[in-house]
Amino acid sequence: MNVEIILFGQLKDIIGKSIINVNDVDNLADLQKILQQSYPALLNTKFVVAVDRKIVSGNIKLSNKNEIALLPPFSGG
Amino acid sequence: MKNNSASERYKRQISIKEFGEASQQKLSAAKLLMVGAGGLGCPILQYLCAAGIGTIGIIDDDVVMLNNLHRQILYSVNDIGKSKAEQASKHLQRLNPDIKIISYNLRLSTDNAIDLINQFDYVVDGTDNFATRYMINDACVLMNKPLIYGAISQFEGQVSIFNSRSKKSEQPVNYRDIFPEPPKTGEVLNCEEAGVLGIMPGIIGLMMANETIKLITGIGEPLINKLLTFNALTNQQYELQLNPTEISSSLIPKDINAFKQTNYEWLCSPGIKESEIDMDAFLPLINNKDVDIIDVREPGEWPDANDFIHIKIPLKELEENTASIKNKTVVCFCKSGTRSYEAAKKLSSIFKNEKTVYSLKGGILLWNKYHANQKHE
């Protein structure tokens, strides 16, 4: 299964794109694992995960239809 | 309306059907505290003062610097080195003499936050560091005050309204429902590292001002329990629905006493206002009676610093001599900037919210080069 992930803030710099696709993943924990392996800098970066425009915590099942976003906190003013 | 000049002043917004006289009166009755008169604070203040918010408090302990002017366009070169809160208040009062503006030339701290916020109905967060953002959030939760939140990171910005409900059945959310705990050092870039395009705080600040007006007057759909992210490069917006979380309520201090004992600077180490300043930023601070400049080198070290008044406290003796540092703004310098950086860190952890401590980047060696160039020009 293929999911699309929208990236915000400095996560775009870490990953190098504003949207990425990840294949063969059906839950959030696996997705996080794949991302951390591909982009180790994510381990030291603070962000929250949103699925279908709601913040989620813990592991949940994913489907093709889910819209996933990773949002870091911003502090600038 | 107070008088004819007031109705003339606001005529063009009163004439909008959805807004009208009733909304103008709600603005006039509102009391709002603007925390931070910087990148976000300036445009917010300019438009909210012009719109006729009746009472506006401005708290900021910083002074205007040359490198602020590309985005903080309420100020001019004549304001450099002067208090942001006081200069902002002066300029804004000229823009609208009919409203009440109160300036607080101090840093919001756990000691003063509760008493200060208590005097206002709405709080707007225009700060630039996590320590103050978490502190404002927690204080507003404890005091049940609506908080208009906004923050930027390069070409993106976030906007939301916390501690409000659009209908009675709704549970209000706060910043900790999005990001329960502050990031640690290195987990996010600060503005200085990341840089900021001047127009960004203008756009996000005005989105915050717009939300403030909608919230006060009850028009439209304010961003209550929603987090909006705006990207200025693509003009794309992304809206998240926010929900209250258990972890959030467990992390907020239990009561006002617990709040006063919370060390927010320590919780968010990147927020400590201890940083390097360059020569351009340093220039307005020299021979300024409101600034203490400290030579942290050992006695007799070369070269001498003859161009500006300063006191001498070697790095090793800083702790014993903090009493001789009187002003709220402090600049440490040494030969090349390494020891003064250590000194600034040390003093920041001693004085916490009381003082803003800088380290002169490049030290006296760079100053001498810079100063020589200036003389030749």
Image (cartoon, rainbow, N blue to C red):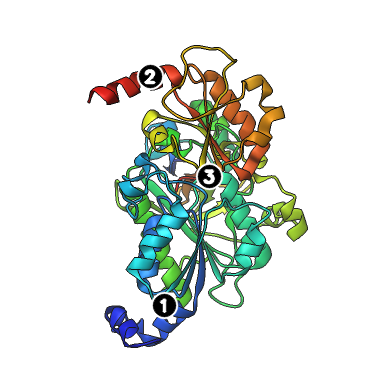
Distance in Å between CA atoms under marks 1 and 2: 58 Å
Q: Please tell me whether mark 1 or mark 2 is closer to you in this view.
A: 2
The image's mark for residue B129 is 3
Classify residue B147 as left or right of residue A58: left
Q: Amino acid at mark 3?
A: Asn
The image's mark for residue B219 is 1
Secondary structure beneath label 1: loop
- For the residue carrying disc 3, how many other residues have a C-alpha within 10 Å: few (<14), some (14-19), or many (20+)? many
Could you tell me which residue is drawn at 45 percent across and 68 percent down? Answer: B212
Q: Chain of mark 1?
A: B
- Quarter of the C terminus of chain B within the rendering: top left
Secondary structure beneath label 3: loop
Classify residue B86 as left or right of residue B165: left
- For the residue carrying disc 2, how many other residues have a C-alpha within 10 Å: few (<14), some (14-19), or many (20+)? some
Q: Amino acid at mark 1?
A: Ile
**Residues at discs 3 and 1 in contact (Cβ within 8 Å):** no
Q: Please tell me whether mark 2 or mark 3 is closer to you in this view.
A: 2
Do marks 3 and 1 share a chain?
Answer: yes
Residue B216 position within the rendered picture, expressed as x and y whole percent measured from the top left: 47, 75
Q: Chain of mark 3?
A: B
**Residues at discs 2 and 3 in contact (Cβ within 8 Å):** no
Distance in Å between CA atoms under marks 3 and 1: 31 Å
Q: Can residue B218 be seen by looking at this rendering? A: no
